[in-house]
Amino acid sequence: MATNYFKNWWFLTLNGIIFIIFGALVLFSPPGLIKTMVTYLGIAILLLGIVLLIIGINNFRREKQANVILLESVAAMTIGLILTFFPEGSVNLIVILTGVWIVIIGIIQLVVLVNVQGSSMLKTGLLINGLLTIALGVSLFFNPFSWAIFLVKVVGALAVVFGLSLIWFSFLLRSRLSANTIEPKTIK
């Protein structure tokens, strides 16, 4: 007996096609598109902040808890305005903050190396991993917009791979459906 999951195999195929189109657009679009995407993201976050503000005001009028929602709305509207009006600077800031975070992770790995008791192979692995992590983090400080473009291209490539795997999986489901729906003929 086929379930609805098998019957709706085409839905996975459609999602796979959408992921492939998205990935191709990201892979083959000019770098200026990143600024446009950040601007639209900023507008969406700004609108979310406005909606949260309206909800917070309504909760305040009804004498419900509204402090957290009002704080979230102010934060969302601030982030939305910054992303909308300063897209390239925002991308640079995000990549630099990511670099700082990665450097901190590398330093933590080196601290673990100093404090760990174990084999020299484990310590060598921690040393190499910690130094490479710090090097990656520091490299993000230099020309962060180029790194952002690279990371967006990686996301595009992953979207294409994910779309292809969804299509492959949908055809596996389709073959399972057709195998389950074929009834053997009886001889009379």
Image (cartoon, helix red, strand yellow):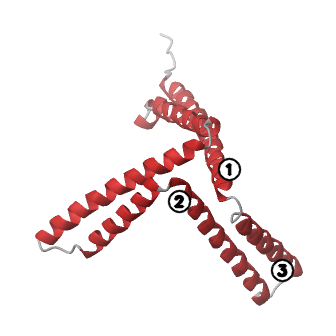
Q: Quadrant of the N terminus?
A: top left
The residue mark sitting in front, 2 or 1, is 2
SS for tag 2?
A: helix
The residue mark sitting in front, 1 or 3, is 1
Horizontal relation, residue 43 to residue 65: left or right? right
In the image, 56 versus 177, the foreground residue is: 56
Tell me the amino acid under the disc marked 1.
Phe
Q: Check the image and name the residue furthest to the left.
A: 62
**Vertical placement of residue 37 versus 138, above or below:** above
The residue located at (58%, 43%) in the rendering is 32
Give the quarter of the image for residue 21: top right
Say which mark, if any, is on residue 123: 3
Say whether marks 2 and 3 touch (CB < 8 Å): no
Horizontal relation, residue 128 to residue 43: left or right? right
Considering only order in the chain, which callout, 3 or 1, is on the residue closer to the N terminus? 3
Say whether marks 1 and 3 touch (CB < 8 Å): no
Where residue 124 appears, as percent x and y from the top left, is: 86, 76
The residue located at (86%, 82%) in the rendering is 119
Say which mark, if any, is on residue 150: 1
The residue located at (17%, 68%) in the rendering is 59
Tell me the amino acid under the disc marked 3.
Lys
Considering only order in the chain, which callout, 3 or 2, is on the residue closer to the N terminus? 2
Say which mark, if any, is on residue 90: 2
Mark 2 and mark 3: Cα distance apart in space: 38 Å
Which class describes the residues within 10 Å of circle 3: few (<14), some (14-19), or many (20+)? some
The residue located at (50%, 29%) in the rendering is 177
SS for tag 1?
A: helix
Say which mark, if any, is on residue 74: none
SS for tag 3?
A: helix
